[in-house]
Amino acid sequence: MSTRSVSFTFFDYLRSILSIASFFLLLIIFTPLILFLLLISFGKFTNLIVEKIAGPIARISLWIAGIRFQVKMHTDSLPGQALYIINHASTLDVLTILALSLPRIRFVAKWQFQYNPLFFLLGRLTGQVFIRREKSDKAVETLKKNVARIKRDKLSLLMSPEGSRKHAGVIGPFKKGPFRMALELDYPIVPIYFEGNRELSPGAFMITKPGVITAHIHPPISLKNSSDQSIDLQIADIRSLYINWSHSKMQTDH
């Protein structure tokens, strides 16, 4: 399916609006419970909230939009702590990364998400990391400040090496930030390829066609003993994997 040829019907708009409304309504309903759980546990229930509450809310919203979300593992197991990376080309990514319900995960998101009071409140309380992507120096500084906390709490991170979903081509250029962060944390990189996000919802808003989205979770990649020169080669190799996965999908469609 070409992203340029996607057209939406009245029912696509209706389902999408209901999906978005349900997502925020469920967040509003569960916010008091989340605050209560964080209060009585002194913040120790954060992982349970991210995995057991946020994930199901996202999956319900996808279901209302007519999307069947599935996860396909290409590895026998996941490492205890890792830096997960995704391809970022759709507004649906917000729902699909939550729907993964990855263990002990925190998300690196753009600073502007905090303009939404719910995202600001829940994001801050659950320890998500907000960065100013347009200011690379400040973004790196924010990430470095979180290294000690992430290591101490044995958390994993999820980032998009493309930075923004607005880029030329199916897979945009990869920034070094996520890979440097993985080296700083001594974490392996775990690539996740979302198949279907871009095809179902290529626009600037979360308007989508019904269909299937598959999250392909691939084997971890170690960056140990990487130098400044070799890390560039590894980043290029990992980006090539994403390009190959996207090409395989397009060939399947045709």
Image (cartoon, rainbow, N blue to C red):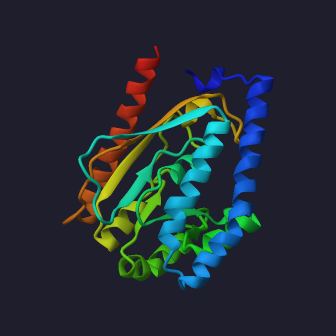
Residue 205 seen: no
* 141 shown above or below 134: below
Residue 80 picture location, percent across and down: 29, 65
Quadrant placement of the N terminus? top right
Along the line of sight, the residue nearer the viewer: 230 or 221:
221
Farthest-out residue, left: 225
Residue 106 picture location, percent across and down: 48, 66
Q: Is residue 152 left or right of residue 56?
A: left
Residue 238 seen: yes
Residue drawn at x 46%, y 13% is 254
* 3 shown above or below 59: above
Along the line of sight, the residue nearer the viewer: 27 or 6:
27
Along the line of sight, the residue nearer the viewer: 169 or 73:
73
Residue drawn at x 29%, y 45% is 237
Residue drawn at x 58%, y 78% is 38
Write down the quadrant of residue 136 in the picture.
Answer: bottom right
Farthest-out residue, top: 254
Q: Is residue 233 left or right of residue 3?
A: left
| Number of callouts | 0
Residue drawn at x 76%, y 68% is 117
* 41 shown above or below 98: below
Residue 121 picture location, percent across and down: 69, 72
